[in-house]
Amino acid sequence: MQLTNFDIDVFLRDYWQQKPLLIKNPWDSWNAPLEPDDLAGLACEEGVESRLVTQTGVCDGWKLEHGPFPETRFSQLGARQWTLLVQAVDHYVPEVAALIEPFRFIPNWRIDDIMVSYATDGGGVGPHFDQYDVFLIQGLGQRRWQVGQLCDENSALQPHEDLRLLANFDATDEWICESGDILYVPPGIAHNGVAIGEHSMTYSVGFRAPSRSELIGYWADDLLAELKDDDRYGDPKLKTQENPGEISQDAIDRLHQMMIEKMGDRAAFARWFGQYNSTRKYPDVDWREEQPIGIEKLREYLTDGMPLHRSPASRFSFIRQEANSVLLFVDGEEFSCTDENITLAEIVCGHDNIIIDENLLRSDSAMALIAKLYGQGSVYFDQED
């Protein structure tokens, strides 16, 4: 599926991170990739992150439960208003993962995952705001969306232990999204979705937006692991000062320099961020094949035209270096690429379905790199294609 009636340049100029936009069914052909029963089945599986939000009917009360859920849980809900949310469905359902492709005009490193929600008539998760951009694709049924004010960490919230619901929601626009419609909501914009009728399913294509505190904290943790205890402050040629209680400007300059020499190393930061940002959302899940693959067997499969794909759970990105090289980052691992492997890095980062030409097939270094990616579960052969 591709977006046809959609001007990317106008969207990026006038709407991205600025204001909401309703995009009426822009697909060349829309087909919902998932049925409600399939979503419920995922929510019952161990290792799949899922939540159930029910409206208790008592003073507009809300209740949150975390999965996995027993298969009988949904039949027990009856006619009450409820919403099931399953995170990272693109990791498990290739047809859902394909929904990311039309949005790759946003760099891959910014893309998070696709959350899918199912709601009964009147169901929703209440008025809230997110700290990241999101495209809300209506899959089945209808959902009424309202958008409101710009919020931040100082916005008042309802007194709820589990849900971040706004205490005040001032709707400024309202739309009814039907199958195939897309609502874009920028970070911080309050919004509220309520299902109309049964079987309302929404696919939320979410994006990553690291906070300054997150970057500083994790980057500092990484630096601390490498610093030696005897790397300490020194002040040779110290001069006497009028008041011993003063921390001199010279001392502050020296101390500050100790900090920024490490924190300000751009090349080191780039390598760290590539690894950090490419780490899988669920790194503890093992996506590796049972057996590794040798270069000759790999070359044989590719020569025979067996389709090679990126794992939906994997994250790929690269950074160009000043010399004729790139750093490839895949699932938290770093690979230094030169010569033909630069082309390979660009291919695996730019396409879900990987096409290897004859030049790369003849390259032992390219085959060795693909074998490493296969061994860590980042690429796989679909022998059913």
Image: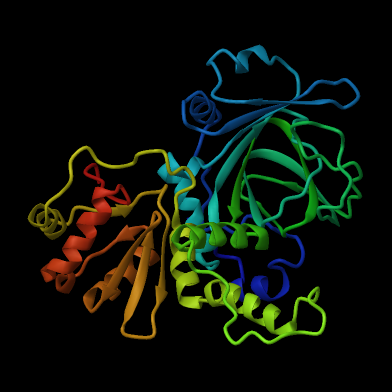
Asked if residue 157 is positioned above or below residue 78 in the image, the reply reads: below
The percent coordinates of residue 355 (x first, y second) are 26, 64
Residue 44 coordinates in the image, percent (x, y): 51, 23
- Please state the horizontal and vertical placement of residue 304, each as a whole percent of the image: 12, 56
Q: Taking 276 as reference, is 355 left or right?
A: left
In the image, is 339 to the left or to the right of 105?
left
Q: Residue at x 85, y 21 (%)?
A: 57
Q: Quadrant of residue 253?
A: bottom right
* Image mark count: 0
- Residue at x-position 68% and y-position 45%: 178
The image's colour scheme reads: rainbow
Q: Is residue 367 visible?
A: yes
- Camera-side residue: 254 or 304? 254
Q: Quadrant of residue 141?
A: top right
Q: Residue at coordinates 45% horizontally, 51% vertically from top-left?
A: 98
Would you identify the image quadrant in which residue 161 lies?
top right
Q: Is residue 2 visible?
A: no
Residue 175 vs 234, above or below: the answer is: above
Q: Position of residue 241 (x, y in %)?
A: 76, 84
| Placement of 28 over or under 194, stated as above or below | below
Tell me: residue 354, above or below residue 68: below
Image position of 157 (left or right of 2): right
- Residue 355 shown left or right of residue 321 in the figure: left
Determine the residue positioned at 25% across, 72% down: 341
Which of 237/359 is in front?
237
